[in-house]
Image: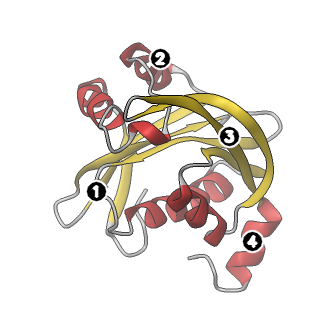
Amino acid sequence: MSSPDQRLRLRPTMLSDLDFVVSVETDARNLPFISPWERTQHEGALRFPDLRHFIVEAGPAYERAGFVILQGCRNVHRSVELKRVVLQPKGQGLGRACVQLLKRMAFRDLHAHRFWLDVKSLNQRALALYASEGFVEEGRLRESVRVSIDGADGYDTLIVMSMLDREFHARVALGQEAR
């Protein structure tokens, strides 16, 4: 699946991509914002039909720029989770383009009723991005994840955000989403 401006596309992750996935996930710039998986967890996600694991390719040559994981793709309640977005280049608009593409996939292709995620409260850039893309805060899981940054240990709060299908379609009608 490609974004309308052709800057970014998703392709299914292959086993040969997992070294790249693990390296991006464990990069020091990404670690404060995620809880990394073991390689075997990624291998399982490639095989489990309820999950979709994609490599994000971007730029004119569509080079690997990160990965995303969707969970709940076969959920009887049509509640799809944006489990993970990890991008290596920062500050180039890839996060926004990726979220927009994933919303279209969730609501148009997977027929989600609810598209949701959780994000660490210290990830202010992601929180601002999700809010600007129409996600609504549902609640907070106070001090639910342990974090270690620059040798300091502590806990961070997860913020649960979601978008409903009717909210997505209203945004499309208002021209806030690509068709």
| Coordinates of residue 114 in the picture (x, y in percent) | 77, 50
Q: Which residue is mark 2?
A: 44
Which badge, 2 or 3, is on the more N-terminal residue?
2
Q: Residues at badges 2 and 4 in contact (C-beta under 8 Å)?
A: no
Marks 3 and 4, how far apart in space? 30 Å
- Residue at image location 42% in from the left, 67% down from the top: 3
| Coordinates of residue 176 in the picture (x, y in percent) | 63, 81
Which badge, 3 or 4, is on the more N-terminal residue?
3
Label 4 sits on what residue type? His
Give the mark toward the camera: 1 or 2.
Answer: 1
Q: Residues within 10 Å of mark 2 (few under 14, many from 20)?
A: few
Marks 4 and 1, how far apart in space? 30 Å
Looking at the rendered structure, the secondary structure element under dot 1 is loop
Decide which of 15, 154 is in the foreground and name it: 154
Label 2 sits on what residue type? Gly
Q: Which residue is mark 3?
A: 157
Q: Which residue is mark 1?
A: 89
Marks 2 and 4, how far apart in space? 33 Å
Quadrant housing the C terminus: bottom right
